[in-house]
């Protein structure tokens, strides 16, 4: 399957909206999806595993969903932490439009769906969350993750969900070699959930 349009600013594939239901112990959300956006017509299994695994997000501060797609993770974060500010970041404008529409439908007003360059450089994140675009390619994925992980606040944590068959263990090895503390917090349905934060003595934070 060609998924390159997920990483395009304006997908060329014809729009065909479909609604899916995200069912979690604490949330039930109907979300609009579309062709040309990751996980069209479904809630990705990795996203479900992540949202069922992560601890309750920080009550305040800036939270980030990297590669937000139609917004399942970002909206769940915003609902669980209504006094935070959630940045839903994607390069795909169709995805961002869906995320905004789904946020409105969920009654969420603490979410901003933006392209990466629209996140102010001064923002530091209390939490970073992602079902990252593994099919982007190893080097581009590493560059993407490093860009955002280095903006974690000193006490901030990131949570990434990656299929074991698509390189979760090698990603964990790279993160550790890059100076991050990495812990596997769950394995389920072929997915790993990784908790990532700055290792003692490391200096990843821009401006620190």
Image (cartoon, rainbow, N blue to C red):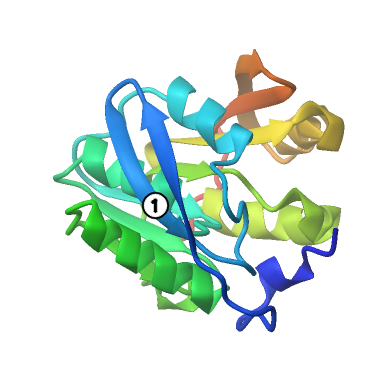
Q: Position of residue 53 (x, y in %)?
A: 47, 21
Q: Is residue 13 above or below residue 110?
A: below
Q: Which residue is mark 1?
A: 31
The quarter in which the N terminus is drawn is bottom right
| Disc 1: CA contacts within 10 A as few (<14), some (14-19) or many (>=20) | many
Q: Depth check: 69 or 203 in front?
A: 69
Q: Quadrant of residue 124?
A: bottom left
Residue 70 lies left or right of residue 11; in this view the side is left
Residue visible at 51% across and 78% down in the picture: 93
Q: Secondary structure at mark 1?
A: strand
Q: How many marks?
A: 1
Q: Nearer the viewer, residue 133 or 107?
A: 107
Image quadrant in which you'd find residue 112: bottom left
Q: Percent position (x, y) of residue 139?
A: 83, 58
Query: x and y percent of residue 76 in the render?
Result: 33, 41
Residue toward you, 78 or 173: 78
**9 or 199: nearer the viewer:** 9
| Residue at image point 83% right, 35% down | 167
Residue 145 can be seen in this image:
yes
Residue 85 vs 164, above or below: the answer is below
Quarter of the rendering containing residue 189: top right
Which residue occupies 41% across, 38% down? Answer: 22
177 shown above or below 54: below
């Amino acid at each position: 399957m060609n998924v390159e349009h997920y990483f395009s600013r304006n997908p060329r594939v014809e729009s065909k909206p479909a609604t899916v239901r995200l069912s979690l112990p604490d949330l039930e959300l109907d979300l609009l999806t579309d062709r040309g956006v990751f996980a069209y017509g479904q809630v990705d299994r990795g996203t479900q595993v992540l949202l069922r695994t992560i601890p309750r997000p920080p009550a305040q501060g800036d939270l980030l969903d990297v590669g937000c797609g139609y917004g399942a993770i970002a909206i769940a974060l915003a609902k669980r932490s209504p006094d935070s500010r959630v940045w839903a970041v994607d390069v795909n404008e169709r995805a961002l439009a869906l995320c905004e529409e789904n946020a409105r439908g969920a009654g969420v007003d603490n979410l901003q769906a933006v392209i990466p360059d629209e996140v102010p450089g001064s923002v530091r994140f209390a939490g970073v969350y992602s079902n990252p675009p593994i099919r982007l390619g190893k080097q581009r994925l590493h560059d993407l993750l490093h860009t955002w992980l280095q903006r974690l606040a000193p006490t901030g944590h990131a949570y990434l969900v990656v299929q074991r068959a698509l390189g979760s263990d090698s990603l964990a090895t790279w993160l550790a070699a890059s100076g991050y503390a990495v812990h596997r917090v769950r394995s389920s349905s072929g997915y790993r959930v990784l908790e990532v934060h700055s290792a003692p003595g490391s200096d990843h934070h821009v401006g620190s």
